[in-house]
């Protein structure tokens, strides 16, 4: 595969006639208004010459990352309802009423609701990868904390941080998919997600 080298078009230097000048060498047909894939589809968004551009990554790498994002989104849904079968055991173990134990589903949902407001902004500042890692570590620590014997307040705090920790899967997950795939691929990938 030829290395993609992108040069500045001549119109930046004052020449308005750029047809046929400064074309990068690549397996993608290039004009300065569009790049076209081998199958003739106009690529949007336009990939850069940078090999770190997610649009230039190999398909296997993109699909592996998509699998991780999909798993995290599965955990997003699973973590809120996972305690329902253990309501009776939680009631006796923590010495709480049935109405109190039902809040164990609502509190992580609160974390899931607040999380995207927090994580989206931080992902724009620090990047999606670090936000996914921090969220995963937070959720893992909270899950370990929720599994330890304790009191109702500590358990509910752990459940809140479980929800907060998996919530990047909602907004940051979609941003990751949009960054990695071209428009004509996104429908399928978002459907899988």
Image (cartoon, rainbow, N blue to C red):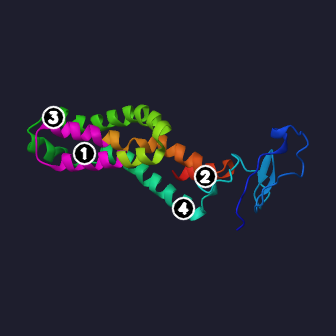
Instruction: Say if residue 142 shows up in the picture.
Output: yes
Tell me whether circle 2 and circle 1 mark residues in contact (CB < 8 Å): no
- In the displayed structure image, the side of residue 87 where residue 168 appears, left or right: right
- Tell me, yes or no, whether the highlighted magenta stretch contains residue 139: yes
Q: Earlier in the sequence, mark 3 or mark 2?
A: 2
Residue drawn at x 30%, y 45% as measured from the top left: 138
Residue drawn at x 22%, y 41% as measured from the top left: 158
- In the displayed structure image, the side of residue 21 where residue 26 appears, left or right: left
From the image, tell me which residue sits under label 2: 53
From the image, tell me which residue sits under label 1: 142
> What is the spatial separation of the Cα atoms under label 3 and label 2, in whole angstroms?
45 Å
Q: Earlier in the sequence, mark 3 or mark 4?
A: 4
Q: Earlier in the sequence, mark 3 or mark 1?
A: 1
Residue drawn at x 56%, y 64% as measured from the top left: 60
Q: Earlier in the sequence, mark 4 or mark 1?
A: 4
Helix, strand or loop at label 4? It is helix
- In the displayed structure image, the side of residue 123 where residue 56 appears, left or right: right
How far across and how far down the image is residue 151, in percent? 11, 39
> What is the spatial separation of the Cα atoms under label 2 and label 4, in whole angstroms?
12 Å
> What is the spatial separation of the Cα atoms under label 3 and label 1, in whole angstroms?
13 Å
Helix, strand or loop at label 1? It is helix
> What is the spatial separation of the Cα atoms under label 2 and label 1, in whole angstroms?
34 Å
> What is the spatial separation of the Cα atoms under label 4 and label 1, in whole angstroms?
29 Å
């Amino acid at each position: 595969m030829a290395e993609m080298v992108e040069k500045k078009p001549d119109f930046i230097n004052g020449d308005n006639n750029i047809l046929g000048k400064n074309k990068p060498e690549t397996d993608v047909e290039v004009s300065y208004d569009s790049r076209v894939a081998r199958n003739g589809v106009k690529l949007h968004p336009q990939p850069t010459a940078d090999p770190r551009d997610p649009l230039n990554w190999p398909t296997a790498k993109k699909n592996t990352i998509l699998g991780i994002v999909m798993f995290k989104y599965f955990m997003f849904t699973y973590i809120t309802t996972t305690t329902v079968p253990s309501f009776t055991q939680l009631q006796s173990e923590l010495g709480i009423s049935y109405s109190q134990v039902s809040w164990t589903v609502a509190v992580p949902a609160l974390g899931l609701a607040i999380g995207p407001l927090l994580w989206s902004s931080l992902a724009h500042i620090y990047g999606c990868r670090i936000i996914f890692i921090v969220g995963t570590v937070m959720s893992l620590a909270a899950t370990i904390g929720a599994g330890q014997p304790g009191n109702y307040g500590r358990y509910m705090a752990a459940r809140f941080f479980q929800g907060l920790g998996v919530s990047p899967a909602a907004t940051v997950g979609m941003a990751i998919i949009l960054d990695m795939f071209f428009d004509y691929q996104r429908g399928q990938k978002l459907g899988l997600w």
